[in-house]
Image (cartoon, grey):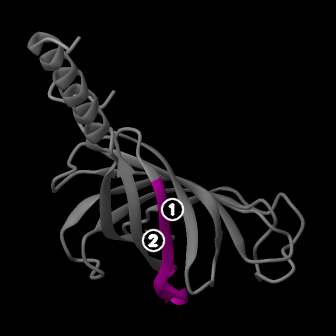
Amino acid sequence: MAPSSSAKQLVAVAVSAFLLAAASSRQQPVHLRLYMHNVMRGPGTTAIHLIHGVGPPHDVERGAYFGDTAAIDDVVTEEPDAGSRAVGRAQGTYMLASQHEEVLTVAITVALTAGPYNGSTFSVAGRVGVYDDKAEAAVVGGTGRLRRAAGYLTWRMVELVVSEKYVMVELDVHMSVPPVSAAGGNW
């Protein structure tokens, strides 16, 4: 006995719904290139020591101690020039995590305040070599249009002015997020 036309239509609808659900579950790629401006003294300071000098002296980094920890609230721009348009803040902590290497453990949330992701955040965690040409850290989450973000970023020191205690870091962010549903969420 051949299937009825209503049974064929039901199967066609079920297959279409399955294919639409599979297509809508694809992750959406997001790529951002941002610049974080870290000022450790003087006017416009964006980083302060929370813990300094408690651990043993660091083997390599003069004047530093194992466990030194700083809190940051750095301006994030879309261009390397510190005077370029601010698009957010990088807020969190970094800690000198090795007694023998110049390595930081970072836990930072980037809160975006302009552009297509205005009001969204993404969070970063990882181990960063202070003077590495490029270091990699994990994107471990996000909010707003970046809810449930996952991926990585490369962290590259672009400029270091020791006398001014100023560091500019390029964040080349590669992450993906679930698509946003018609209801506004990405659940």
Q: Are marks 2 and 1 in contact (CB under 8 Å)?
A: yes
Please give the name of the residue rendered at 26% of the width and 38% of the height, measured from the top-left corner.
Answer: 24
- What residue is shown with label 2? 39
Question: Is tag 2's residue or tag 1's residue first in the polypeptide sequence?
Answer: 2
- At which x and y percent is residue 170? 41, 76
Q: Is residue 63 above or below residue 127?
A: below
Q: Nearer the viewer, residue 61 or 107?
A: 107
- At which x and y percent is residue 71? 55, 54
Q: Quadrant of the N terminus?
A: top left
Please give the name of the residue rendered at 22% of the width and 77% of the height, measured from the top-left corner.
Answer: 83
On residue 29, the disc is none
Q: What residue range appears in magenta?
A: 151-165
Overall secondary structure of the magenta section: strand
Amino acid type at circle 2 is Val
From the viewer's perspective, is 141 left or right of 82? Answer: right
Amino acid type at circle 1 is Ala
Q: Dot 2, crowdedness within 10 Å: few (<14), some or many (≥20)?
A: many
Magenta span includes 102? no
- What residue is shown with label 1? 47
